[in-house]
């Protein structure tokens, strides 16, 4: 299997299949062994000073890093631009899908299960946003991680105007 390119412009089209195609693209990057190896060093550095087995603290530390250290920057106008976690790390910029993908890869690289959540944050606007949920293995609870908005609280999700769709 060829590794995904480091970034790409994607035309997803219209209609209900769009979300599925979008998630497939994200999952290709998320599951790339090369990407996971690249981000693992940062994930381990971020949690290095924490005691072992403090899952909520590890999750929070990584979430806050992506939320605060990666600048939210919009896509190319009219085109979905997806970039790999390593590109987002290098540029320290990306939109909601880039930040969600980096957050997911960082958490997965140190053993946490994550899933993407697609939401509609505008009335009658359709699905327009993605964020991450992470499974806390100690509690068995999925924790929403909205990393695109500065100072957004840990464990809260944005309001949505359609039922969210979740993808592991």
Image (tube, grey):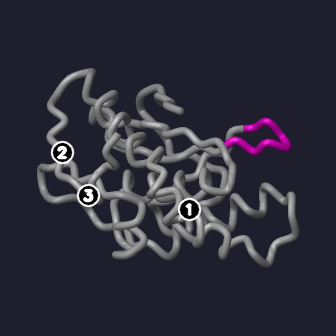
Which mark sits nearer the N-terminus, 1 or 3?
3
- Residue 17's label in the rendered image is none
Proximity of marks 3 and 2: CB atoms separated by less than 8 Å: no
Q: Secondary structure at mark 2?
A: strand
Label 2 sits on residue: 10
Q: Position of residue 50 (x, y in %)?
A: 82, 72
Using the numbered discs, state the Cα–Cα distance from disc 2 to disc 1 in whole angstroms. Answer: 28 Å
Q: Which residue is found at the position 84% from the left and 60% from the top?
A: 54
Number of residues whose C-alpha sits closer than 10 Å to that of mark 3, classed few (under 14), some (14–19) or many (20 or more) = some
The one nearer the camera, 25 or 155, is 25
Number of residues whose C-alpha sits closer than 10 Å to that of mark 1, classed few (under 14), some (14–19) or many (20 or more) = some
Q: Which residue is found at the position 21% from the left and 53% from the top?
A: 8
Quadrant housing residue 10 = top left
Label 3 sits on residue: 7
Q: Which residues are magenta?
A: 135-141
Task: Name the quadrant of the N terminus.
Answer: top left
As drawn, 91 above or below 102: below
Number of residues whose C-alpha sits closer than 10 Å to that of mark 2, classed few (under 14), some (14–19) or many (20 or more) = few
Label 1 sits on residue: 152
């Amino acid at each position: 299997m060829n590794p995904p390119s480091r970034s790409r412009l994607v035309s997803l089209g219209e209609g209900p299949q769009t979300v599925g195609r979008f998630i497939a693209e994200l999952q290709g990057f998320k599951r790339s062994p090369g990407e996971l190896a690249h981000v693992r060093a940062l994930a381990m550095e971020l949690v290095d000073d924490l005691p072992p087995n403090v899952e909520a603290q590890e999750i929070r530390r990584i979430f806050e890093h992506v939320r605060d250290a990666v600048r939210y920057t919009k896509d190319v106008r009219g085109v979905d631009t997806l970039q790999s976690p390593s590109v987002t790390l290098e540029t320290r910029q990306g939109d909601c899908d880039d930040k969600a993908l980096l957050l997911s890869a960082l958490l997965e690289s140190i053993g946490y299960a994550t899933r993407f959540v697609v939401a509609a944050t505008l009335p009658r606007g359709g699905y327009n946003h993605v964020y991450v949920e992470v499974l806390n293995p100690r509690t068995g609870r999925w924790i929403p991680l909205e990393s695109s908005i500065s100072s957004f609280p840990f464990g809260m999700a944005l309001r949505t105007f359609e039922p969210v769709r979740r993808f592991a």
